[in-house]
């Protein structure tokens, strides 16, 4: 089969890497890809938002399955465009991708179908929002309705911070039209866990659990990022908890989407807060998580291509996933300044040495090739994955490889996976 993977991050490198292991995959393309995807696929210079360009490429190159990494093309309707041209594609269509594309849509879905989530109100008017903040008091969370590249959620510890967040989104239009409407919601406390599922709209098969590390600095301090690392499985996600999530969250989400006329297929990612009143949904994503995918896919023994085909043909009920029981840890190496401004084009050393280690995989994210050298080209530059018999071994493996890699002003968290140790595994 000819496969096209869309995107250029660490997630897409891990998708290409895993798909390349399928005996059914004859040729894999990645658009636009990065030097890591180029190790296992052929990069194609088409941007991930260029839906018509991607459609034409898929047609001319007889692509049998297209896999979409990032959310923006899904929300823009890439699946609808491909399907109306008879091109098989893995992911939700435009209506279904609203589950990520509009936080208000997803909050209303949860309310209607009794899916546990933080209490909330929506606003378009600043004055009204300010009055509400005064009434309920801090802490609280202010969210832009639409896509904001992972930056549209502001956790506010004081009323002043909350008012400022409202102004940034509604008046200053920091996130453009994505902030025409906002949500103000209750601040939940607990540990977070990500559950990524395959679904064909009827059957839901969760993958191994994972935990992301969103804050930039150790001990969960500093601003939020796209994710500074992850580990899988999350020991806090016990079988009991997962059954509860299946019954009270995943099933009602899928049946609710169908009932609302937005039938869902592809990856359904639920970000959960494990509160003392049980798991509550923080957000849905319509795609694989980044960096969760980098530590989940190396643990998946089943043929990913086969599973994806079953999702597309709506035969997921015939699938069972097999997992490597060994935990995996992914440490993200970021450019100096990230998540703020950072420089690009800095040479990276040590990649070859790190690649030679057993039970280590180095996934590229923001990298580029320049005059035969690999240089930085983004905020999150690399994801270094280690596997081990215990989470402790996986952590050690990953940091052993991290020590071999260097670029000027590189920074990373030193505590990835430490929370899992607390749970005694
Ligand atoms: P989201 O983009 O919706 O996942 O939000 C990003 C991060 O903001 C989440 O992973 C949480 O750490 C935090 N967050 C979102 N909503 C809430 C909430 N209601 N209470 C506490 N933290 C939240
Ligand atoms: N790691 C969080 C996300 O992919 O949205």
Image: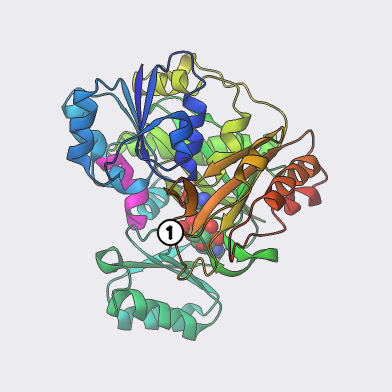
**In the rendered image, which residue does mark 1 sit on?**
150
Residue lying at the far bottom of the rendered structure: 160
371 over 178 or under it: above or below: above
Indicate left or right for 48 with 36 as reference: left
Q: What residue sits 33% from the left and 36% below the top? A: 92
Q: Tell me, yes or no, if residue 252 can be seen here.
A: no
Q: Main secondary structure of the magenta part?
A: helix
Bounds of the magenta segment: 94-104
Q: Secondary structure at mark 1?
A: loop
Mark 1 C-beta closer than 8 Å to ligand 2: yes
Image coords of residue 281 (percent x, y):
51, 51
Indicate left or right for 365 with 299 as reference: left
Residue lying at the far front of the rendered structure: 371
The quarter holding residue 74 reads top left
Which quadrant of the figure contains the C terminus?
top right
Image coords of residue 160 (percent x, y):
48, 86
284 over 126 or under it: above or below: above
Q: Residues within 10 Å of mark 1 (few under 14, many from 20)?
A: few
Q: Tell me, yes or no, if residue 159 can be seen here.
A: yes
Q: Is residue 348 magenta?
A: no
Which one is in front, 159 or 197? 197
Image coords of residue 128 (percent x, y):
32, 80
Image coords of residue 322 (percent x, y):
62, 21
């Amino acid at each position: 089969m000819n496969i096209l993977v869309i995107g250029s991050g660490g997630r897409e490198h891990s998708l290409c890497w895993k798909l390349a292991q399928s005996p059914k995959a004859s040729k894999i393309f990645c658009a636009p890809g990065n030097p890591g995807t180029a190790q296992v696929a052929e990069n194609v210079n088409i941007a991930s938002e260029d839906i018509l360009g991607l459609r034409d490429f898929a047609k001319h190159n007889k692509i049998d399955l297209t896999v979409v990494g990032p959310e923006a093309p899904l929300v823009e309707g890439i699946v609808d465009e491909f399907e109306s041209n008879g091109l098989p594609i893995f992911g939700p269509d435009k209506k279904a991708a609203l589950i990520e594309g509009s936080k208000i849509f997803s909050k209303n879905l949860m309310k209607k179908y009794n899916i546990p989530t933080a209490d909330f109100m929506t606003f378009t008017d600043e004055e009204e929002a300010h009055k509400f903040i005064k009434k309920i008091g801090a802490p609280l969370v202010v969210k832009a309705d639409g896509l904001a590249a992972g930056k549209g959620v502001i956790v506010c510890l004081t009323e002043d911070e909350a008012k400022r967040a409202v102004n940034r989104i509604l008046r200053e239009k920091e996130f453009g039209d994505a902030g025409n409407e906002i949500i103000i919601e209750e601040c939940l406390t607990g540990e977070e866990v990500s559950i990524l599922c395959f679904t064909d709209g009827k059957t839901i098969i969760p993958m191994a659990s994972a935990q992301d590390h969103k804050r930039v600095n150790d001990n969960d301090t500093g601003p939020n990022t796209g994710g500074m690392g992850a580990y899988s499985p999350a020991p806090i996600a016990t079988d009991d908890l997962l059954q509860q999530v299946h019954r009270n969250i995943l099933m009602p989400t899928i049946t609710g989407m169908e009932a609302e006329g937005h039938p869902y297929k592809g990856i359904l990612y639920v970000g959960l807060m494990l509160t003392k009143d049980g798991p509550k949904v923080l957000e849905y994503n319509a795609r694989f998580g980044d960096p969760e995918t980098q530590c989940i896919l190396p643990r998946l023994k089943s043929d990913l291509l086969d599973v994806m085909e079953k999702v597309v043909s709506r035969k997921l009920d015939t699938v069972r996933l097999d997992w490597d029981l060994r935990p995996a840890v992914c440490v993200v190496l970021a450019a100096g300044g990230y998540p703020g401004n950072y420089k690009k084009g800095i040479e990276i050393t040590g990649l070859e040495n790190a690649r030679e280690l057993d039970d280590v995989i180095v996934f590229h994210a923001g990298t580029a090739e320049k005059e035969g050298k690999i240089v930085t080209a983004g905020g999150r530059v690399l994801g270094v994955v280690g596997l081990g018999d215990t989470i402790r071994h996986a952590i050690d493996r990953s940091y052993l490889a991290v020590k071999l890699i260097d670029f000027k002003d590189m920074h990373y968290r030193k505590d990835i996976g430490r929370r899992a140790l607390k749970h005694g595994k």
